[in-house]
């Protein structure tokens, strides 16, 4: 099934100047870039986005990191986009990420792990509409 998934190029990757390299990896893997924008998230926006992790020990550090600089928000589309993006991203902890994955190449630590990707159809639908309105998705 053709799916959309929400990806984020996180602040460490933008700061390190590898946003373009990450976008190129998605295009080489045949994802279509359906929408894209650079923003600096507020604490409230980041907390709402990561609401499922509220109360966990890493939540404060995650919000501090995600608001520490601009991010690039991307809607990717292809057949099986959600799972295929999780595969190309690599494991959450970059120490466990497979060779050639985005996190293996561009993560700086467990928290500063370069990219986000939706983990299910339900979260993809929520996350795409959290950041993009219908007019931004029709081009
Ligand atoms: P994301 O949701 O960002 O795509 P993920 O789905 O692979 O990542 P989650 O379990 O949803 O992983 O965690 C969200 C983010 O919180 C991780 O990407 C990472 O930045 C941070 N994080 C998660 N667990 C830890 C941890 N134990 N220590 C430090 N940071 C963590
Ligand atoms: Mg997640």
Image (cartoon, rainbow, N blue to C red):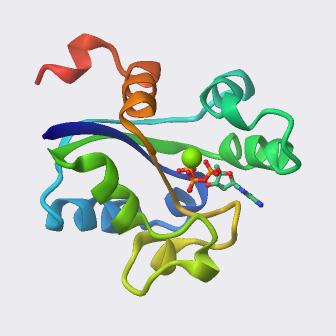
> What residue appears at the point 64 percent right and 70 percent down from the top-left corner?
93
Which residue appears farthest toward the bottom when viewing the image? 99
> What residue appears at the point 25 percent right and 20 percent down from the top-left corner?
136
- Where residue 55 appears, as percent x and y from the top left, is 86, 35
Q: Is residue 13 left or right of residue 18?
A: right
> What residue appears at the point 50 percent right and 71 percent down from the top-left corner?
103
- Where residue 60 appears, as percent x and y from the top left, is 85, 42
- Where residue 102 appears, as percent x and y from the top left, is 42, 71
Ligand 1 found in image quarter: bottom right
> What residue appears at the point 36 percent right and 83 percent down from the top-left corner?
100
Q: Is residue 10 left or right of residue 23?
A: right
Q: Quadrant of residue 46?
A: top right
Q: Is residue 104 left or right of residue 33?
A: right
Q: Is residue 89 left or right of residue 67?
A: left
Q: Quadrant of residue 127?
A: top left
Total count of labels: 0
- Where residue 41 appears, as percent x and y from the top left, is 61, 32
Q: Quadrant of the C terminus?
A: top left
Q: Quadrant of the N terminus?
A: top left
Choose between 130 and 18: the one closer to the eye: 130
């Amino acid at each position: 099934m053709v799916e959309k998934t929400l990806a984020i190029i996180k602040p460490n990757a933008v700061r390190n100047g590898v946003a373009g390299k990450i976008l190129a990896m998605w295009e080489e893997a045949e994802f279509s870039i359906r929408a894209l924008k650079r923003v600096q998230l507020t604490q409230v926006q980041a907390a709402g986005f990561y609401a499922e992790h509220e109360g966990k020990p890493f939540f404060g550090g995650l919000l501090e990191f995600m608001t520490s600089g601009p991010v690039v928000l991307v809607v990717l589309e292809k057949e099986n986009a959600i799972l295929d993006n999780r595969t190309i991203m690599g494991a959450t902890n970059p120490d466990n990420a497979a060779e050639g994955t985005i996190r293996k190449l561009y993560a700086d630590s467990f928290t500063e792990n370069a990219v986000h990707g939706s983990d299910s159809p339900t979260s993809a639908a929520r996350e795409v509409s959290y950041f993009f309105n219908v007019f931004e998705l029709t081009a």
